Amino acid sequence: MSDLKIYNSYSRQKEIFKPITAGHVGMYVCGPTVSGESHLGHSRPYITFDVVNRFLTHLGYKVRYVRNITDAGHFEEEGREAEDKISKKAVLEKLEPMEMVQKYTNLFHWAMAQFNTLSPSIEPTATGHIVEQIEMIKKIIAAGYAYEKNGSVYFDVKKYAAEYDYGKLSGRVLDDLLETTRLLEGQDEKNDKADFALWKKASPEHIMRWQSPWGIGFPGWHIECSAMATKYLGAEFDIHGGGMDLLFPHHESEIAQSRICNHVAPVRYWMHNNMITINGKKMGKSYNNVIKLTEMFSGQHPLLEKAYHPMTIRFFILQTHYRSTLDFGNEALLAAEKGLKRLWEAYSKLSNIVYEENKNAFDKTLDDKIQKLINELTDFMNDDFNTAKVLANLFDIVPIINSMYDQTIPVAALSKKTFDFLQKNMKEWMENILGLTSFSDEDNDKLQGVMQLLIDIRKEAKSKKDFVTSDKIRNKLQELGITLKDEKGGDMSWQIE
RNA sequence: GGUUCCGUGGCCGAGUGGCUAGGCAGAGCUCUGCAAAAGCUCGUACAGCGGUUCGAAUCCGCUCGGAACCUCCA
């Protein structure tokens, strides 16, 4: 079997994965900022790394998957000013940060459940780790790589860059940065334009604030990930994931802080997923082209022709390699929806097929083909998690399953061993590794019973050539959104649209 | 402007030197009371121009077009 290879953003090449601690993997993924609702673009990293997590587990690793919740920072809820701290409104009228954070955290968890992503092992919050962050900043100051100015603390990038390769991860040259960094608020108190904040003094209207050795303030954007990753995964850990847009300055800064603090480069393998684009442009607030997840699921958005099931989105994302951009479009989503439906139906049919021995029916070519298609799946995933290729192989298996189900191909064309292998692996790959689920609720016992009754009546009618009755049943059900299909051999199957 | 990356058939997308994924849409056929599924077959694409090579979508150069980051960002 092939070795797992991961494209490391740091070295810009695929590397064979070797965990620091045998049998274990420590993985940190940058989580959501819960000051607003997640949009389609946000779903990409969480689905991508969910599959990474699932596949590593499949390989037998014990994975500690840490994904943070960013609930501290410069908070304002959309359409609401952050001046509440000094306003004269009553307490209950004011924006309470934790209330907002709770609301969007809940919504995020709900969306992740819709996508059938597994929960991280630890989901630490930034506000819950202020102490760790302050301790880390203290260490960096003591090491001489940070300085305090008017209640804020900045990281000395120039000093760091003199000794370490600042900019290597993001392919940046410090001199260029000094030239091109734009003017921002508070820029003048930095010693150098490239320096970044570890701790920021809170202005009076800033509603999230904590006491620190440097006065009342709040942590800088990058320090939370360094502090929490160190705490839960150690100074040096295996995988750090996130969107490509976080390469600079976020991850570059993380490396710098952690290295000074812990005297070691924090991450072995940096993984970055590419963006979801819309008309070729990244989906993002500043482009005014976001489609929120609730809108995706409900279809309530001018760009959407219909509602899309979370599983359709998950499948849509997995059909592309995670390092490629993925262009949003109704046509593409619709294609994903139909494709997933066909794949899932074949998969459910497979579990209903009963194997019957028949030595004469054995077809070695087909048997070998199935073995090959399944064995390749692991190789594809081992090659930097190529879910697109995995799905292509699964689709190659679909017509074979359907033909066996329709008995156009005898089940015994496959050896018992291969058939069992097929059943077992389809389940493993579809459900456990790709994390797909059925997108309707056909597995309701009562509904099953009612449907079976209708099917029996329709069968009777058909046998009497009473097509008026049989068509009535099928048409009425269709109006309700249930499709009834006649199958070869006289059986019927049904499905909720 | 700097850094990095990309440009594949109607659409979405794999693919890094020869064996020319896959999904969806489209066409034809089979099965079928009809329908829906399903099965079979078909389309022969790699921005343009040069170069390297026996051979390039895949390597090199140039041109054109697009994107990401440099600012909050998945």
Image (cartoon, grey):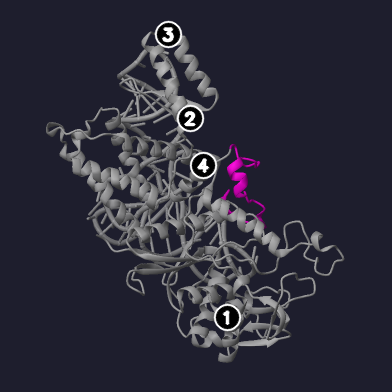
Cα separation, mark 3 vs mark 2, equals 25 Å
The mark nearer the N terminus, 1 or 4, is 1
Residue at x-position 35% and y-position 56%: A381
Marks 2/1: CA–CA distance? 68 Å
Tag on residue A466? Answer: 3
**Label pair 2/1, CB-CB below 8 angstroms:** no
Seen from the viewer's position, the closer of residues A147 and A70 is A70
Q: Which contiguous range is marked in magenta?
A: A278-306
Residue under circle 1?
Answer: A175
- What's the distance in space between the residues labelled 1 and 3, CA to CA? 83 Å
Instruction: Give the CA separation, mark 4 to mark 3.
Output: 40 Å
- Relative to A10, say whether A272 is above or below: above
Above or below, A13 against A410 in this view is below
The amino acid type, in three-letter code, at marker 2 is Leu
Q: Nearer the viewer, residue A149 or A451?
A: A451
Same-subunit check for callouts 1 and 4: yes
Quadrant of the image occupied by residue A89: bottom right
Estimate the x, y position of residue B21 in percent, counting from the top left.
34, 44
Would residue A284 be counted in the magenta stretch?
Answer: yes
Label 3 resides on the chain identified as A
Q: Earlier in the sequence, mark 1 or mark 3?
A: 1
Which chain letter goes with mark 1?
Answer: A
- Total tally of numbered discs in the picture: 4
**For the residue marked with disc 4, what is the amino acid?**
Leu
Report x, y in % for residue A345. 39, 35
Q: Secondary structure at mark 2?
A: helix
Gap in angstroms between the C-alphas marked 1 and 4? 44 Å
